[in-house]
Amino acid sequence: MSHRPSARATAAVFALLAAALAACGGSSSSESSSASATASTIDDATATPTGTITVYSGRTEKLVKPVIDRFTAATGVTVELRAGDSGALAAQILTEGKASPADVFFSQDAGALGAVAGAGLLRTLPAKGLLDVVDPAYRATDGTWVGTSGRVRVLVVNPTLAPNPPKTIDDLLAPAWKGRLGYAPTNASWQSFVTALRVLRGEEGAKTWLTAFAAQQPKAYEKNGAVRDAVDKGEIAMGLVNHYYLYEKIAAEGAAKVVAKNVYLAPGDPGGLVNVAGAAVLASSDNAVAAQTFVRFLLNEESQSYFATTTFEYPLRTGVPQASDLPTLASLRPPKIDLADLESIEKTQELLTSVGLLTK
Amino acid sequence: MTTAVATGSRARRRRVELPPWQLLGPTVVVALVALAPIWYLVDQALDRGWGPAIEEVAQRRTVDLVVRSTALAGFVTLATVLVGAAAAWIVARSDLPGRRVLRVAFAMPLAVPSYLSAFAWVSWDPSIAGFWGAALVLVATSYPYVYLPVVAALGRIDPAQEEIARSLGWGEGRIAVGLTLRQARPAVLAGALLVAQYAYMDFGAVATMRYEAFTWVVYGAYRAGFNPTRAALLSVVLVAVSIVLVTAEGIARGRVDASRVGGGAARRGRPVRLGRATGPAAVFVVVVLGVALAFPVVSVVSWSLWRGGEAVAFGEVFSALWATVGVSAIAALVTAVAALPVGLLAARYRGWIARRLEQATYVAHTLPGIVLAISMVYVGVRLLRPVYQELPLLALAYVVAFLPLLVGSVRAAVEAVPERLEDIARSLGTSRSGAWWRVTLPAARPGIAAGTALVFLATMKELPITLLLRPTGTETLATRLWGHTTLSDYSAAAPFALTLLVVAAVPTALLSGLLLVRGREDGGHVG
Amino acid sequence: MSAEATHDTAPVLEVRGLRKSFGDRRVLDGVDLVVPAGSITAVLGPSGCGKTTLLRIVAGFEHPDAGTVTVRGVRVAGEGTDVPPERRRVGVVPQEGALFPHLDVRRNVGFGLPRGAASTERIRACLELVGLADRADARPDQLSGGQQQRVALARALAPNPSLVVLDEPFSALDTALRAKVRDEVVGALRAAGATAVFVTHDQEEALSTADRVGVLLNGRVAQCGEPIELYRAPASIEVARFLGEAVVLPGELDRDVVRCALGAVVPGSVPPGASSGSFLTVVVRPEQIVPSADGVGATAGETTYFGHDGLVRLHLDDGTEVDARWAPPLLPRPGDRVGVRVVGEVAVYAAPGPGR
């Protein structure tokens, strides 16, 4: 009986909604048009860093806090740290666009950095003393981000169960290893390896290997640490993990108690991929000088040694030694690949799903 | 006369007229806020225009995803209804010993975050992963959504009906299923809607159990694909699912409403003797509580024993605890304030506008946490830049995420307050809105408080929104837990996980108290 | 409290031509009702006659489709006026009390009062009026049904309303309690000098309690008056049938008497236009048919025994069946021959009776 008043109110609601949507449409279009990489680099060597910077970190507070504390002590610049998942933080930056409060994006992997760089939201870093202290293989070709530490894909092996471990990923397909392999299907580094496989062997080649690998009935674990522990306990003969998981266990339990060993794959084998964590300065940063100083700080010898000794990662600054037990990166001769190509993880996940290695 | 009263009261249960502006205004504002994610989704989904959008959605894979997610949500909803209703019946109507303890214990799994439960199971046996693992965890963590309202409803049913049924030759089993639980149908429906939505949006269980559901793919689109458009398009499909669910529940509820008879129980019925069924009932209790509560708790306790571990960082635990309690309390209170007008309007008014406004607050409820988080990022940087990554916007994001939990509670609680009381208040000189303030809402307080506790609980366990929108430097128990488990440092994570479980148990106990104490032990009415 | 109310000669409530439909069901179809100041008026009607709807319209909870409601000379509903309930000063006592469950007795009674010392005194006075001064701190669920009803009355009286309306106030109480609570409530209403309207489907309750009774039939007030007048001289056969048992017989006017199956009976009044020889309808109450040796011959049929009296079915010699209400010692056995006659005046209607 009250048709007219309700119709009027409905109209009012829609007018409000329309206004809100119009406001949104306007702002988003203006942003996408202005999205382009900032070409001019800042010379932070001469400018003095001051104020505060906000760091979006894909690494947890526990890992980066010591470096940040030293940075603040050295420069007087305060750091607002926002730790989260690298991928989610990249999505956040992509959504924030030019309005992002972030000055630095410190990512656990190259893919997330590449995605943000692709949207034109990163500032080109200067070569001198910053990009050029790192091997070109571990930084962006366009200079928008730089690797800060590396991790190598290895086989973690139980020497009793596998006295003669494979040296290539194709050796893993031997009948002897059927049902005795372990992997962590949701782990980002594993998925990076598969992405590298796609880049190196093509989609068909990758699919062939993955299908054969799936036929080996490998055991899926929740995390790399669980793969390592299963190998150590002798539940399986070996697993595909990052190199530092073994060292974490040794550090926690003592070398005497740990049975498992790392086996590095043959030079150039896709299984020996090196993934990097890296950092970048946001194009929208209102304190680019301090931000760039922070990235430079991550690459100084002190910070690089910190990564090497506490997380057992490979320092990427040329000349900084890795932890004593590790072979040098150069001696490993990992597969040659542009890390920016590792961005297409979603396609990798589709491939993994199709061969039955990701979901159940 | 009785028929006249009955028809009369049914006719005026909800007004068709336009609600007064004091109610309509706030409700429209709240509905618009709740629709904020839709604004983002539409804008993002149509980023590349209609053509690519339709192409992206109209894939075989999308259909597969709908089927897979619906299979999971459907199974979980059915199973939670069975488990929740059985648990409620045992507590409310059977003579199983220890019901007082069970009454609260059955609600406790609400305190267990799905990611914790899932992780505990997968670490114990990785082969559990997949559909059944995900279903197990979802049922274990969400059956209290059915159990709580049903056990409250059972306490209000007139035992005389059971006695009459018995005199007509019905057996105990037939009475329990065909009469007692049948009357709790509105409560079952409300709980089932929450569970279904939860099963669609939860990430912890499907991610850990590696079941390729919608949430999994949406997270992947953001975090691995860096493809927000795809994520948004899939989310739009989820919103469509949500609308179907909400509409279906609305239709089912409408039917139940018409057949519901008023009046409360004058006395409490004698418990049903289980007899030979005592054994199976006890096994049911042990299995449910073992799977849903004991196993995850024991598993978390065992973490602290892993690898000796370093000393517990009590300072960090305490500050995380305070941050968690503070943020959750603010979120719960703000959400309660936002839910009041919506729930009141939904309970007291009918018609197109009232229905749509209420439903608007529900549609975002099937959206995964990361979608809500990113949409609030989107809204925040555009409209609320000054409070971006500050408490007000964080609270607003929680409001959007958890509003449906509270709107449902407020609506149910207000519906239980006879409109007659408002009439009386008005005849005593109070305006209509005055009557709501002085009579309806105070009388509905237990139900509203229960909903508030539910939101408090949900906020404590929340992770993706907290990570992206918290004020810089704020660490909650959930973010600390995430930080440590990301590094596989379970001994360091254990104190945070344990604190979370213990602290979450408080609102859970409060919740069961608020919902269940209503029917006083010895029957309230003397006359 | 309402000393002035008793001086007031104008009616407190005037309802004119009230109509109300729910969907296509017409509930009220032109209700007229006048309630004098200081009186207790019962609205009596069968189930579903719209009594509650009438009260809800008077209280302002429902809007009439047509007609007007005037309280103390002020139009509150109809013809464009719609005074909200909170400004009508009409106190409501609903079925089952409907106390505010979250408030104790004191706060329930004080709900319609401003805060302050005067109100505290008023609450005490009202509770005393209903005899519950000692239960001020009790919660509603600690009270018996009758106590709840009395608190509801105290709550309605507290703000000193122009009119109190009570909706089937005693129907939820069991029989034993009912009469007691009824007396207490009516006593309190009279002590307060309040003007009250209550609705009920219980004729005994209406006739014994109220000063005036309005009979609501088919959406209209068929008759309104003092109880005894209503019973003795029902305005229509419907009213007569609704109020107590009625023996309806065809008759013929013969000067001052009406001849019918029960012989010559004396009409209370003669319908206008009726003259000697007119066919009429006679309504006789069963208690008016008494044993009389020289009366109309009849054979006794079955008897229904009520304790204080009994109903006997009489087969009159002309074949007509009537029921008579006699004291137990007078009750015949089935088959006994008896003679009967009618005492007192009977109601007579022009309306064509069953004989037509």
Image (spheres, coloured by chain):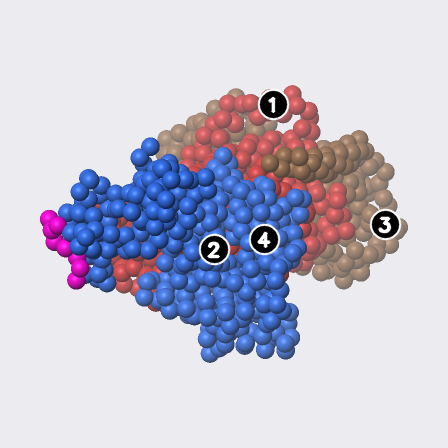
Mark 3 Cα within 10 Å, few/some/many (few <14, many 20+)? few
Q: Is residue A200 visible?
A: no
Q: Which chain is brown?
A: A
Residue for point 52% across, 52% down: C55
Q: Look at label 3 and name its amino acid.
A: Ala
Q: Which residue is mark 2?
A: C225
**Marks 1 and 3 on same chain:** no
Which residue has dot 1 on it?
A: B54
Q: Residues within 10 Å of mark 4 (few under 14, many from 20)?
A: many
Q: Chain of mark 1?
A: B
Label 2: which secondary element: strand
Give me the chain letter of mark 4: C
Q: Are marks 4 and 1 on the same chain?
A: no
Q: Tags 4 and 1 in contact by the CB under 8 Å rule?
A: no
Dot 4 corresponds to which residue?
Answer: C14
> Which numbered disc covers residue A45?
3
Say which colour chain B has: red
- In the image, B225 versus B189, the foreground residue is B189
Q: Nearer the viewer, mark 2 or mark 1?
A: 2
Tag 1: amino acid: Ile
Mark positioned earlier in the residue sequence (4 or 2): 4
Q: Position of residue B232 (x, y in %)?
A: 62, 34
- Tell whether label 1 touches label 2 (CB within 8 Å): no
Q: Judging from the image, what secondary structure is the residue with disc 4 in? A: strand
